[in-house]
Each structure stands twice: as C-alpha cells, then as structure tokens.
Amino acid sequence: MNSLPIGVFDSGIGGLTVVNAIQEHLPNEDIVYVGDTARVPYGSRSPGTVTEYATQIAAHLEHIGVKEILIACNTASAVALEAVAARTSLPVSGVITPGAEAALELSGSAPIGVIATRATITSDAYRSAIQRLNPAAEVVSVATPLLVPLIEEDCIDKPFTADILQHYFEPTRLHACDTLILGCTHYPLLADQIARVFGKPVVDTPTATALTLAKSLDQRNTRNESDGAGSLSVLLTDDADRSLGIVSRRLGVRITETSKVDLSELAAPETRPPDSPSA
C-alpha cells in the first residue's frame, strides 16, 4: 500500500502547482496526475457536469491503483468532493479546507479575500469552509475568469496582466482584506503579480494542501519510505499542448512520463454499496 502512487486530478494542467508542492514536501512519493484537458474548463460548467467528470476520473485512478485521491481542482473540490468520496473506498481530499485554514492563520480582523473561477465563487465553498472554522470571519469573494487564459497563453509577465488584475481589484472590496486566497490552482503562477497589486499576504494553498496530504499519509501510516525520488506520470484526456510545457517549465515540475487517456476509459463509476466504509 505504501508504495502505491498518490492520485491527483484537475480540470487541466493548473493542478501541477499542487503537484509541485507535493514533490517538494513529499519527494519520495510517486504521483499519477490526470488533467482533463479535453473538457477544461470546469469553472464554467454546471455542478452536475463537474461531479460527473470528477467521479469518472476518481474511478479511473482507483482502477489503476492509487492509495489516496487529491482533487487539485478548486471547482471540483467545491462541488464534487462529497460525491467522489461516496463512490470510492479511498481517502479523498481537496484544496478548499487547507486554503481556508491557511488563510485564517494569516488573517487578522479584516475580511479574507477570495479570487477564483465563477463556479468556485458561486459555490460559496471558501466562505463556508472559513466560517465553519471561524463563524465571525468576513469573506469577500470575486470571480476572476480572465486569469486562467492569461496563464495558459504565457502572458504572465506581460504589462497588461497587471492592468487586468487592477480591473478585478479596484472596483471591489478586495483591498479592504488583509489576506487573499488564490482559489484556482492556476493562480499561484501569478502569485508575485497578484501580491504586488494586493500589497498584502497571499495564501500559499498548494503548500497548505501538500502539508495536509502529508498529515493524512502519516495518520494512515501510508508514506512511501523509499529513498529514491518519486515519479510523476501525467495523464491527459487530450493531446498535450503548449500549456503543459509553459506550466511545467515555470514550476520546474519533474515529469517522468506523459500519456493520453481516452475519455472512453473514464467509465461512469458505480455507486458504492451503503455498507461500504467511508473515505
């Protein structure tokens, strides 16, 4: 069990920001990463559709043999985590709770800001997670749909990127916040530019997620004790395009192999029997 890989999935390649943090904090672990590049983005899709896609991918990861599943997609974490956990016998986690916990550790008395895709903002998942931990916390949530295309078109360092960030920050209450959650796995690639516009701490959700995953492995005594560096297999549901190269190059992610998984292989998962153990 300990030598099995960790299964990670996202709607596209943005989840490699989380994989990068896992490689840093859990360097011995093998990882299988599924990027649903044929059906990206999830942020503009209905909750039902996102849940269907997420449960399909989780079933595929369980079928090929992983010891734990991490949903590295904020949108899928927000709307599909419970459904995924109900349909697999494996431990399942997401990125929402680690991000909320990290924000509360940094925050003072001012509101906590969240920027994310429309679907994540509409789900109110971050507000719910933060206020579950601290009912008195105020949250300012803003949808920022132009940021993912900027990153995937390799426009991170372009002058107009700062203008687009100002477009989202200026007319909102984000500047009244003392902490900001980057509620999309792509956004850490823009962390430096966002921090300059925001002028205050930006939550490192990938690191918080990797550390939470490490605790989960420790609690279950399922860490890989190998001395060697872990492998990273990237499975994409469409042919690899330039965005994979852009993101992996900027992050320095160590990819062992890349291959394509056919959508027909992502069969609709069976619902677990009522007496199956919970994840």
Image (cartoon, helix red, strand yellow):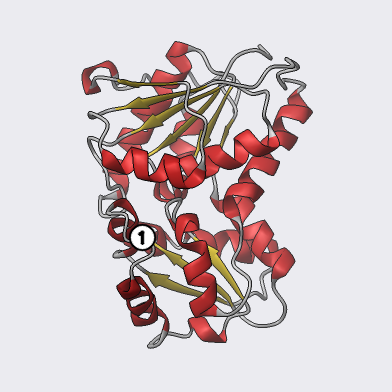
| Rendered location of residue 128, percent (x, y) | 55, 62
Q: Which residue is mark 1?
A: 117
Horizontal side, residue 62 vs residue 217: left or right:
left
Q: Quadrant of the C terminus?
A: top right
Query: Residue 250, relative to residue 274: is it above or below?
Result: below
- Answer left or right for 205 relative to 255: right
Residue 162 in percent (x, y) is at 38, 75
Amino acid at the residue labelled 1: Thr
Q: Residue at x 24, y 19 (%)?
A: 262
* Residue depicted at x 61% and y 36%: 22
Question: Could you tell me residue 102's position as x and y percent?
Answer: 67, 59
Assign a secondary structure to mark 1: loop
Image position of 51 (left or right of 125): left
Q: Decide if residue 12 is in sight here.
A: no
Instruction: Give the crowd class for mark 1: few <14, some 14-19, many >=20 residues within 10 Å.
Output: many
Percent across and percent down for residue 212 are: 68, 42
The quarter of the picture where residue 67 lies is top right
Compared to residue 150, the image places residue 225 above or below, namely above
Q: Residue at x 54, y 72 (%)?
A: 195
